[in-house]
């Protein structure tokens, strides 16, 4: 028996409804992972007085190795100049957002999300 277009559309909608909660949960976990990695990197940068290349690489490596992000799609913007104590160091990570729906036609949101942080430097000359 062949299925009609309406039956196929119903099937696709049911599949999307079944998997949407799981995919939305994964999306929220990825957002939280980026936030935690950024916060941990900021703590280290606070002591160093800046985001060193090693700290930046460690943040990227964590996102790639533990959370399967595509390294080429991660954008890190940080304060790399040495910042004295009681001045702010800033950083942001923009990462690709995972899809929430099986069919991309239902996904109208942005393709990336961005997390930002600001922390006081603890660096003493």
Image (tube, rainbow, N blue to C red):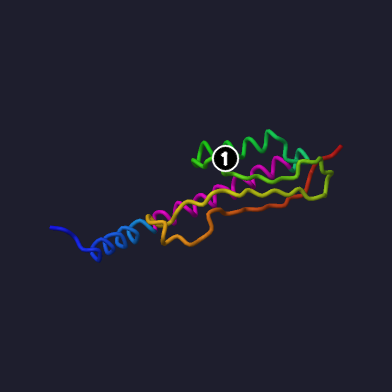
Q: As drawn, which residue projects farthest toward the bottom? A: 6
Q: Residue at x 34, y 61 (%)?
A: 17
In the picture, residue 18 is in which quadrant? bottom left
Whether residue 121 sits left or right of residue 109 in the image: it is right
Total marks in image:
1
The one of 101 and 41 positioned closer to us in this rendering: 101
Q: Quarter of the image containing the N terminus?
A: bottom left
In the picture, residue 24 is in which quadrant? bottom left
Q: Residue at x 66, y 38 (%)?
A: 56
x and y, in percent, of residue 90 in the image: 73, 49
x and y, in percent, of residue 112 in the image: 55, 53
Q: Which residue is mark 1?
A: 72
x and y, in percent, of residue 71 in the image: 56, 39
Q: Residue at x 78, y 45 (%)?
A: 121
Whether residue 39 sits left or right of residue 28 in the image: it is right
Does residue 58 sit above or below 101 in this rendering?
above
Does the magenta portion include 42?
yes
Does residue 75 sit above or below 22 in this rendering?
above
Does residue 82 sit above or below 120 in this rendering?
above
Label 1 neighbour load within 10 Å: few <14, some 14-19, many 20+: few
Whether residue 109 sits left or right of residue 46 in the image: it is left
Q: As drawn, which residue projects farthest toward the right? A: 125
Magenta region, residue range = 21-45
Q: Quarter of the image containing the C terminus?
A: top right
SS assignment at label 1 = helix
x and y, in percent, of residue 107 in the image: 45, 60
Most common SS among magenta residues? helix
Q: As drawn, which residue projects farthest toward the left? A: 1
Does the magenta portion include 50?
no
Q: As drawn, which residue projects farthest toward the top? A: 54
């Amino acid at each position: 028996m062949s299925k009609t277009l309406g039956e196929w559309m119903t099937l696709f909608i049911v599949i999307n409804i079944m998997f949407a909660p799981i995919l939305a949960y994964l999306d929220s976990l990825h957002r939280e992972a980026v936030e935690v990695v950024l916060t941990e990197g900021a703590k280290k940068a606070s002591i160093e007085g800046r985001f060193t290349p090693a700290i930046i690489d460690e943040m990227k490596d964590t996102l790639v190795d533990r959370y399967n992000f595509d390294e080429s799609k991660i954008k890190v913007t940080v304060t790399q100049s040495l910042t004295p104590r009681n001045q702010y160091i800033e950083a942001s990570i923009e990462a690709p957002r995972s899809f929430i729906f099986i069919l991309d036609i239902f996904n109208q949101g942005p393709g990336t999300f961005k997390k930002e942080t600001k922390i006081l430097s603890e660096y003493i000359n």
